[in-house]
Amino acid sequence: MSRMKEKPDRKKTHDARSYHRTQMQKELIIEKLKEKGYRITTQRLSLIDIILANECSSCKEIYYKAMEMDDRIGTATVYRMVNTLEEIGAISRKNMYKVAYSESCSMEDACIVVLDDNTIHNLSAKNWNNVIKAGLIAYGYVNKQNVTSVTFNQCECKNRSC
């Protein structure tokens, strides 16, 4: 019986610590935003809460979670906020983007590709998977395997044109 009581108490303590840490992070982010002259709007606060509470792998995922809270939040707002948070050092997108779509996924607009002449291609999940797989086959990286996920890391080279 005593073991059963210990687990919920530990969970409550862990949840309280997690909440306290998240609240401290939120306060530090708000302070940094104010120092840089940003207004602290309800939309910005909502986005901060979403980012701190979830392990979102993309701006699109943050956007979908934000839409559940406030359908007036647009994608541009999410992208600007993520860029701002990265600029002030609150987040790092080094491992933020993870793409995981199977060949049978029917999601449209899963990937947006922008070329250097500003041509934009919206790829469905199936097309995205096919493009990645064709490239991997062409370079001899895969034979009969299927792609399960692709993770992008932020460029850390000194070349600023990346």
Image (tube, rainbow, N blue to C red):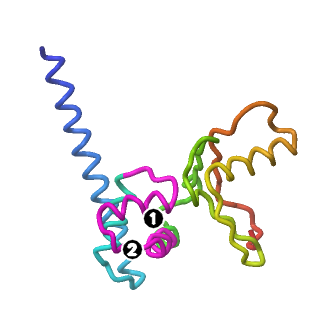
Q: Which residue is mark 1?
A: 90
- Label 1 crowding class (10 Å Cα cut-off): few <14, some 14-19, many 20+? some
The residue closer to the viewer here, 29 or 129, is 129
| Side of 146 relative to 31 (left or right) | right
Residue for point 36% across, 63% down? 66
- Residue 121 spot, x, y in % from top left: 69, 67
Residue for point 58% across, 50% down? 98
Indicate the secondary structure of the residue bearing disc 1: loop
The residue closer to the viewer here, 117 or 24, is 117
| Side of 100 relative to 141 (left or right) | left
In the drawing, what numbered circle is on residue 159? none
Most distant residue in the right direction: 139
Q: Is residue 160 above or below residue 22?
A: below
Indicate the secondary structure of the residue bearing disc 2: helix
Most distant residue in the bottom direction: 37
Q: Which residues are magenta?
A: 54-83
Q: Are marks 2 and 1 in contact (CB under 8 Å)?
A: yes
Q: Which residue is mark 2?
A: 32
Residue for point 87% across, 39% down? 140
- Considering only order in the chain, which callout, 1 or 2, is on the residue closer to the N terminus? 2
Residue for point 55% across, 52% down? 107
